[in-house]
Image (spheres, rainbow, N blue to C red):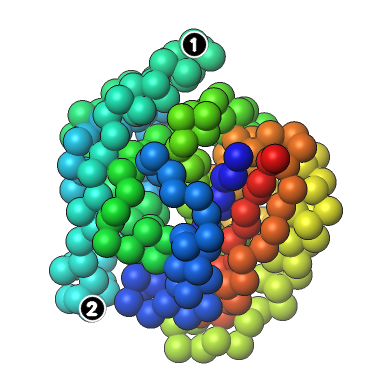
Amino acid sequence: MTSLFVSHGAPTLALVPGLAGPALSQLGTELPRPTAVLVVSPHWMTQEVQVGLSEVPATIHDFRGFEPAMYELEYPAHGHPSLAKKALSLLDNAGWKPVADAHRGLDHGAWVPLTYLYPGASVPVFQVSLPANLDSQSAYQLGQVLAPLQEEGVLIVGSGSLTHNLYEVRWRDNNSAEYAKAFSQWVREAVLENDQARLINTLALAPHAQRAHPTTEHFLPLLVALGAAGPDARGSVLEGGIEHGVLSMDSFIFRNA
């Protein structure tokens, strides 16, 4: 079984692929074809966990101030209501009190990386929201609860950003900040060493963690993917580089034979 953490960075990744886009495209050709993709993204945060049941989820352009071409992009994937209902059941049985949303579309945390991973919107997609009160341990537990969906052929994707300090973004300067490099390297080493305890405690232990993530929502999807992979999963790195000075675009693949 395989789960992913993908760094989607700025929405402009959809038009400017950098290193991350081709790496995701290559990965999409190598992975077994999933029945559906389940995405947990920081751009759908709710009080209680919610599950999108839309049969044809709309492409949500949930950003402002970008070039007009960004708002013309569409990712017309089908949803998968029957598998989404199984996610609801798993969450309900685990005591999470999930809520169904029959109309939720795909936010850019979902459709931007999927534009590369599965171009042509050829694989059904549904989303599970990120509960607003989630912490590192409960994010890992959320992944554990959703993990049985992998037996149905579902690819579980946590979409976020390995570093995400928008206060320090330098749109026209690609000189990488030292703190972003140090934090990213620390996490990369923990992934490659399969040290799940260290990863779960990243925000408390990693160098410059608070500066790399002034808020936690773009990091927690990594722990959802980790939890879905299981305790014996082995991690590998998908190189993404650092964009706009501070946005680390590395992604991670967690495989459990």
Query: Residue 50, can we see it?
Result: yes
- Closest to the camera, between mark 2 and mark 1, is 1
- Residue at point 52%, 54% (across, down): 31
Residue 134 point in image, percent of width and height: 55, 33
Nearer-the-camera pick, 73 or 133: 73
Instruction: Please report whichever mark, 2 or 1, sits nearer to the chain's N-terminal start.
Output: 2
User: Which residue has dot 1 on it?
Assistant: 93
User: On the rendered structure, is 75 left or right of 15?
Assistant: left
Q: Secondary structure at mark 2?
A: loop
Q: Secondary structure at mark 1?
A: helix
- Residue at point 70%, 40% (across, down): 257
**Corner quadrant of residue 89:** top left
Question: Where does the N terminus fall, quadrant-wise?
Answer: top right
User: Which residue has dot 2 on it?
Assistant: 67
- Tags 2 and 1 touching, CB below 8 Å: no
User: On the rendered structure, is 247 left or right of 98?
Assistant: right
Label disc, if present, on residue 195 of the rendered structure: none
Nearer-the-camera pick, 109 or 194: 194
Within-10-Å neighbours for mark 2: few <14, some 14–19, many 20+: few
87 versus 219 height, above or below:
above
User: On the rendered structure, is 197 left or right of 137?
Assistant: right
Which residue type does callout 2 highlight?
A: Glu
**Corner quadrant of residue 44:** top left
Which residue type does callout 1 highlight?
A: Asn
- Residue at point 16%, 69% (across, down): 72
Residue 245 point in image, percent of width and height: 56, 80
**CA gap, disc 2 to disc 1?**
44 Å
